[in-house]
Amino acid sequence: MNCWQISSSQGVHLLGKRRWPQTRDNLFWRRVIQDEGEQNCVMCGSEAETAVHLFVYCDFAVQMRKGMIMIWNAVIWTLWLHRNKIVFENGIGDVEGLVAEVKISSSKWWIERTQATPCLFYEWNQEPLICIGSM
Ligand SMILES: [Zn+2]
């Protein structure tokens, strides 16, 4: 399973498994981590790893959100184009075709936006979040 296949109910389940993330600051507070210096974020290493830092302010979280927003924009744009194809060209609804178009357009937008190709389309097609996270 990759991110293109996760349904919303699975996403909720994944988030619902733990009540509070076991971030480094939480582990330090619970004395699982003894050294104060080990509280830093494992992603960026620049600040204490609080839940707020990890999910909101960490550079990795910011990059991931930008990537997800770009993919969401590709979904909306592709839906609009598909809708117009149905209305003006007697097209038919095709969810698999829509997903394929979203993958292609989001890949193109990502390459254009980053001015680099850290991932091949094959990799983007399998797991775009890894590509987004590798920037
Ligand atoms: Zn961080």
Image: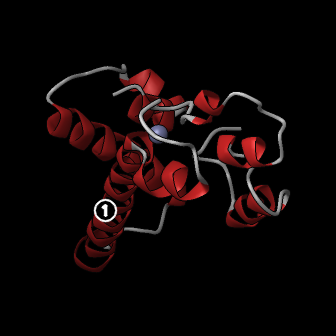
Label 1 element class: helix
Query: Closer to the camera, 89 or 48?
Result: 48
Q: Residue at x 26, y 39 (%)?
A: 110
Determine whether, in the image, residue 52 is placed left or right of residue 69: right
Label 1 is placed on what type of residue? Answer: Asn
Residue 98 at x, y percent in the picture:
43, 56
Q: Residue at x 52, y 54 (%)?
A: 55
The answer to which quarter of the image holds residue 124 is top left
Residue 97 at x, y percent in the picture:
45, 52
Q: Residue at x 39, y 61 (%)?
A: 72
The answer to which quarter of the image holds residue 37 is top right
The quadrant the N terminus occupies is top right
Query: Closer to the camera, 124 or 49?
Result: 49
- Neighbor class of circle 1 (other Cα within 10 Å; few <14, some 14-19, many 20+) is some
Q: Can you identify the residue that label 1 sits on?
A: 73
**How are the residues colored?**
secondary structure
